[in-house]
């Protein structure tokens, strides 16, 4: 069966520091991968999606970037975090017309 | 552009009572419809989905949803809620055969269960 992992689970970072969040999927090949952000009390905002290695589509202009160095690995990064980057970050993969979500990473920027 | 509306931001029901969460969508094409549940601090878990066929779909944890094309609705129901159902519920829609298209989510309905 397929599983999706996110690392780390929780992160507290100072403003201006770099960021790297990792998402890995097991049990499937060539999945579509997605990064979402969920701000406190708000819905889900799609940040990036990828249909293959090195193929990244950005949904909104922002302080973040994404990369897909391997088929089942999706990384969310920032060179300098802003306070507004705080939130709950969710990775998802899609198969059989359905998206499945990881456990999420809670990021607090101070 | 497609949109999803969940008109109830917060619903409170008594344990054992029935539940209905509303979802309306606006879409120019045949939609695929989903309900997800999110417990505090957790990711989203798929409850059920509708692609085609029988408009009443059964999901996990005793939930069901009914697709009504004429009303552009996909309401989620449960006959008797349990305290463990307290969570946030999201309705989502995507165009049929979406491939790499994106889900459009509603803003969510937070469910509180009282004893």
Image (spheres, coloured by chain):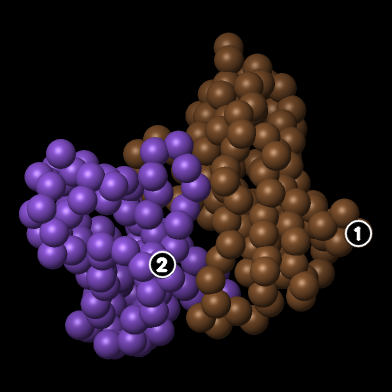
Q: Is residue A96 visible?
A: no
* Label 1 SS: helix
Q: Is residue A63 left or right of residue B18?
A: left
Q: Which chain is brown?
A: B
Q: Are marks 1 and 2 on the same chain?
A: no
Q: Is residue B91 left or right of residue A48?
A: right
Q: Looking at the image, which residue is at 67% across and 59% down?
A: B3
Where residue A34 sits, quadrant-wise, is bottom left
What is the chain identity of the residue bearing mark 2? Answer: A
What is the chain identity of the residue bearing mark 1? Answer: B
| Foreground pick, A56 / A69 | A56
Residue bearing mark 1 = B70
Residue bearing mark 2 = A60
Q: Is residue B63 visible?
A: yes
| Foreground pick, B96 / B51 | B96
| Foreground pick, B55 / B58 | B55
Give percent across and percent down for residue B54. Answer: 82, 63
Q: Classify the position of the N terminus of chain A by image quarter.
A: bottom left
Give percent across and percent down for residue A78. Answer: 18, 63
Task: Please tell me how crowded label 1 is: few (under 14), some (14-19), or many (20+) other residues with Cα within 10 Å.
Answer: few
Task: Please tell me how crowded label 2 is: few (under 14), some (14-19), or many (20+) other residues with Cα within 10 Å.
Answer: few
Give percent across and percent down for residue B96. Answer: 68, 77
Q: Classify the position of the C terminus of chain A by image quarter.
A: top left
Q: Looking at the image, which residue is at 56% across and 66% down?
A: B103
Q: Looking at the image, which residue is at 58% across and 62% down?
A: B104
């Amino acid at each position: 069966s397929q599983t999706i992992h996110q690392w780390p689970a929780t992160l507290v970072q100072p403003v201006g520091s770099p960021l790297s969040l990792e998402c890995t999927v097991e049990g499937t090949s060539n999945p579509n991968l997605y990064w979402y952000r969920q701000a406190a009390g708000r819905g889900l905002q799609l940040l990036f999606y990828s249909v293959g290695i090195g193929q990244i589509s950005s949904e909104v202009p922002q302080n973040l970037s994404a990369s897909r160095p391997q088929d089942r690995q999706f990384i969310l990064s920032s060179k300098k975090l802003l306070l507004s980057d705080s939130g709950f970050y969710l990775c998802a993969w899609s198969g059989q017309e359905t998206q499945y979500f990881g456990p999420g990473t809670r990021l607090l920027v101070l | 552009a497609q949109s999803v509306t969940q008109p109830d931001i917060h619903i409170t029901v008594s344990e054992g009572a029935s539940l209905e969460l509303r979802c309306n969508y606006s879409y120019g094409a045949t939609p695929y419809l989903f309900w997800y549940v999110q417990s505090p601090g957790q990711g989203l878990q798929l409850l059920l989905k509708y692609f085609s066929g029988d408009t009443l779909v059964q999901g996990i944890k005793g939930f069901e949803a009914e697709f009504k094309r004429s009303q552009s609705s996909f309401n989620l129901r449960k006959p008797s809620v349990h305290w463990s159902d307290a969570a946030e519920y999201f309705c989502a829609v995507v165009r049929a055969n979406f491939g790499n298209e994106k889900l459009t989510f509603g803003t969510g309905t937070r469910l509180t269960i009282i004893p």
